[in-house]
Amino acid sequence: MNVVVSLVEWRAPIGDPGIVDVEIVVDGVVAKLGSIATTPENCAIRTAAAKTTEFLCGDSTFDANLEPEFVVVTRDGREVRRFDVGSSAAISVAPYQIQSAPVPTDASAP
């Protein structure tokens, strides 16, 4: 029996000064969830379980919950995104990594 597990990663890269752009990555698909007036150091994973994960950032709470065939993402209790994950039986949550500077888009940049 093959068990399918979806990979979830929370990100909070720096946007404008004093702003982070909260993102979630589900099975390699990136979705921007909104901008928050805070720093990446004020964001953290609160829960990482087989069927749910919670990410706190500034004064906002983001959740991702595994439902039949979907990962449903909410911000402060309101649905903001759905990802089709087919027959996934669980999610695996990657560790949150603080980015202190914007990631260059050009691989040759220092």
Image: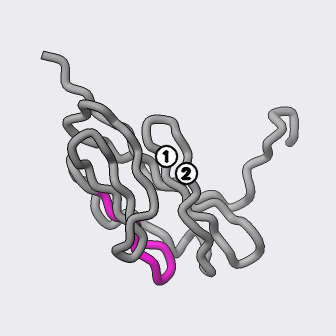
In the image, farthest residue toward the top: 1
For residue 31, the mark is: 2
Mark 1 lies on a secondary structure that is: strand
Q: Which of the pair 75/44 is nearer the observer?
A: 75
In the image, farthest residue toward the right: 109
Residue 23 in the figure: left or right of residue 47: right
Most common secondary structure along the magenta stretch: strand
Q: Quadrant of residue 2?
A: top left
Is 55 covered by the magenta stretch?
yes
- Vertical order, 55 against 18 (above or below): above
Mark 2 lies on a secondary structure that is: strand
Q: Which residue is mark 1?
A: 25
Q: Which of the pair 87/48 is nearer the observer?
A: 87
Is 56 covered by the magenta stretch?
yes
Q: Which three-letter amino acid code belongs to the residue tagged 2?
A: Ala
Q: Residues within 10 Å of mark 1 (few under 14, many from 20)?
A: some
Q: Which three-letter amino acid code belongs to the residue tagged 1?
A: Val
Q: Residues within 10 Å of mark 2 (few under 14, many from 20)?
A: some
Image quarter of the N terminus: top left
Q: Are marks 2 and 1 in contact (CB under 8 Å)?
A: yes
